[in-house]
Amino acid sequence: MSSSYVILGAGVIGLTTALELRERYPQANIIIVAKFLPGDRDASYTSPWAGANWLSVATDNGRQEEWDRITYQKFKELAIRTAEVGVYAMPITAVYDSEIEDAGVLSTGTGKIWYDGLVGGIAMLGEERLPEGAKFGYELSTFVVDTQVYLPWLQGEARRQGIEIRRGMFESLDELFTAFPDANAYFNCTGLGSYSLKGVEDKSIYPTRGQIMLVESPKTTMTRMYFRSPQRVNKDTTYVFPRGPHNGVVLGGIRLDNDWSGEVDLELAEDIKQRCCALAPELGKPEDLKVIYHGVGLRPSRKGGARLERERFAEHLVIHNYGAGGAGYQASWGMARGAVDLLQKDSRL
Ligand code: FAD
């Protein structure tokens, strides 16, 4: 008899986990069940609101760096089919307003930026290229994800590969076990939902509110992303992520911990415009930007980092894969691999 798996959650983590599972267990019955699916918009459904790019925040010299490494390599493969998948190869210019030792970019133990080799070399910016006040900066080759294309693509891939997708909202793990009594394992990919899902109720989870806007692509074609911040992870972060040459540009942002509000702050939006135009000359003047929409997303942050763990509830096996914070895209394929590895009891991830 073939095995059967249920994935709770259809954000980037749930969808990617489903595809990884299918790759490793071609004969398995796999069902994704979620309250929100690609196409839906709600501040608590984080994935549609992300920038999103690959600029690792991991410095643990361990599993988080490994998740990002695996995903970078996967994005490299996917970017060959950019138009269909929504992953674009694109360089980024990142500048920091703290000295490198205080910017949260150096890996524990090695004291180096761990992804230098992975991305084909990081080019440090000369002083003449640093904006006023910046302490250091670099450029590297990386990827930007158009979430409006990528999430439906992941969902479409899942369907094409025989994975069933259902809409469903669960109060508790028990309710999930009752609805799907015969599953060999249940993957909990509920992001912020793990804060209140009974049976999990993880109070280490907290929202990190972000605010973005999508603007029309400027006439001067944008071929790079920009990022400026006091530190790699900081509340005063500014970023400009073009979704390819013509699909608009995402401007952000902010990182406010423990803020559950899904409301757009229009004063903040004006400030974001100013900061982004100062950073990316191609955008032109703030007053000339054509805003298509504003958005707020709540990143599923977690004290101690993401939870990838097996847990037994009597005869049911639950594999947790949530709490990716601001790294859910760039860690997605690595976290999915780690979660599926956990089906084997002696897995080390
Ligand atoms: P979600 O996308 O929230 O999905 C959770 C799923 O679980 C949903 O389908 C939901 O309906 C379902 N669910 C929850 N509870 C229940 C329940 N009880 N019953 C049924 N279903 C349930 N990441 C990067 O890697 N790079 C970036 O540049 C980046 N930029 C970002 C910018 C902003 C402004 C924001 C907000 C986020 C950004 N992120 C970025 C972070 C990234 O978006 C998140 O880490 C990621 O989307 C989390 O995905 P997830 O699948 O865990 O959660």
Image (tube, grey):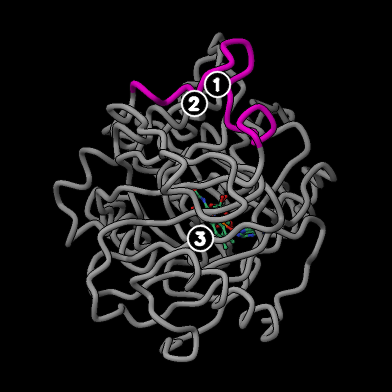
- The spot of residue 331 in percent (x, y) is 48, 38
- The spot of residue 248 in percent (x, y) is 33, 75
Inspect the image, locate mark 2, and give the three-letter code of the amino acid beneath it: Gly
Disc 2/disc 1 C-alpha distance (Å): 9 Å
Residue highlighted by disc 2:
338
In the depicted structure, whether residue 224 falls above or below residue 334? below
Q: Secondary structure at mark 3?
A: strand
Would you say the residues marked 3 and 1 are in contact, meaning their CB atoms lie under 8 Å apart?
Answer: no
In the depicted structure, whether residue 277 falls above or below residue 142? below
Dividing the picture into quarters, in which one does residue 345 lie?
top right
Inspect the image, locate mark 1, and give the three-letter code of the amino acid beneath it: Arg
Residue highlighted by disc 1:
63
**Dot 3, crowdedness within 10 Å: few (<14), some or many (≥20)?**
many
Q: Is the CB of the residue bearing disc 3 within 8 angstroms of ligand 1?
A: yes
**Is 88 situated left or right of 102 in this image?**
left
Q: Secondary structure at mark 2?
A: helix
**Is 132 situated left or right of 165 in this image?**
right
Q: Quadrant of ligand 1?
A: bottom right
Say which of marks 3 and 1 sits in front: 3
